[in-house]
Image: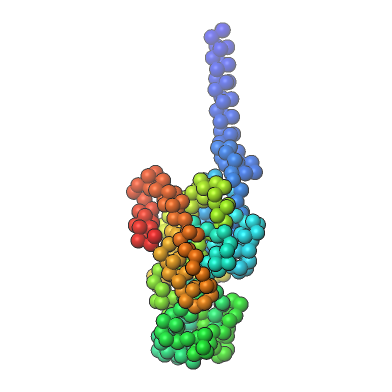
Amino acid sequence: MKRKLILLLLVSLIGSIMLTGCDSSQKVSGSNTEQGKTLTKMKVGYLPSPEDLLYFVAKEEGFFEQEGIDAELIQFTNSAEGLNSIVAGKIDVGTFGVSAPLVFTAKGEDILMIGGQNSGACALVCMPERYEELKDVKNYNGKKIASVRLSTADVIFRGALLDAGIDWKKGEAQMIEMESPAATMEALKKGSVDAALIWTPYVAMAEDQGVKIAMYITDLFENNVCCRQTLLKTKFEENPELWEDFMAALIKSYDFYQTNHEETINATAKYVKVDKKYLEKETYADNATMVCSPDPMRKSINKFWNIMNQTGFVKSDININDHINTDIYKAALDILLKEDPNNKNYKKLAEEFAIQN
């Protein structure tokens, strides 16, 4: 009888421990992970574009949480607004093109770029009947080009004009500045300009809008750099390990986006309110130029910095490499590769890092 009582007590105790253990592993309260570990809150700024899909996937698929981060995604309407919020300390990090962080750096702000978000995704469009003439940048003498000032496409195309011997500064071509790619596209359709610079998702919409892609920006700047992971140096120095975790989440997001098409489009569609067929085309079509990658792309940033100086958007002798940190991304990638040495996407990122940095 005594043995039976002891056995019953043991069974009861084990059952209690098991139930408690199950309850603990499932509990998510506020900023806690499933293991009860407190997450670090982080405000992450983004623009509503497929280009920022690494954020969307990391948030929706739980990669930020896996890395101990409670990420709040905050939408901005333009790059200047986002960078101002970084400088003011209203957000912790964001990706807002590459021109904006470089301009802020040239003005003396404490900017640091630690990774990437995307490249490509920009194009110059014209009316179909003028394609043969306008597919060559050398034929833009005297032409009007609608553009959004300091957008990635704007800076690269202005540099290409100068390289082609067409000095837009002297009026040999006119850059008609507008507020958005939607506005540049509309100006083209109305006939007030000869060509228009656009970016995703408008590149995917081009044919349905009755215009033709004259050239992709990657034709002018192969593997061109665009949105970078940008924050303040002081913010980074407070906790470098946190930013290694942040980049690990984006690397996992890259792996997911490469292998899970439908889920990636669904995650992106929550933040980018356009028809899914355009998101699919921009992201996965055979001729899509948008490449989302967390790689910092140091070499391309340097090339873009030189174009910024060439075009006069900045006048600075700052060593831009002092504002780029590739080590934190490499450390995160090395850890993930050690954990999953056969992952082909991680291997691809490692190969690209060696070339691009």
Q: Is residue 320 left or right of residue 345?
A: right
Of residue 35 and residue 310, the one placed in the foreground of this image is: 310
How does the figure colour the protein chain or chains?
Answer: rainbow
Residue 356, quarter of the rendered image: bottom left
Answer left or right for 175 relative to 341: right
- Look at the picture and state if 38 lies above or below 255: above
- Whether residue 307 is visible to the viewer of this picture, yes or no, is yes
Q: Quadrant of the N terminus?
A: top right
- On the image, the x and y values in percent for residue 52 come to 52, 62
Residue drawn at point x = 52 percent, y = 50 percent: 243
Image position, residue 96 (x, y; %): 55, 65
Residue at 57% over, 63% down: 108
Q: Is residue 179 left or right of residue 352?
A: right
The answer to whether residue 153 of the structure is visible from this angle is no
The x, y position of residue 75, in whole percent, is 62, 62
Which quadrant of the figure contains the C terminus? bottom left
Task: Identify the residue at image location x=49%, y=56%.
Answer: 114
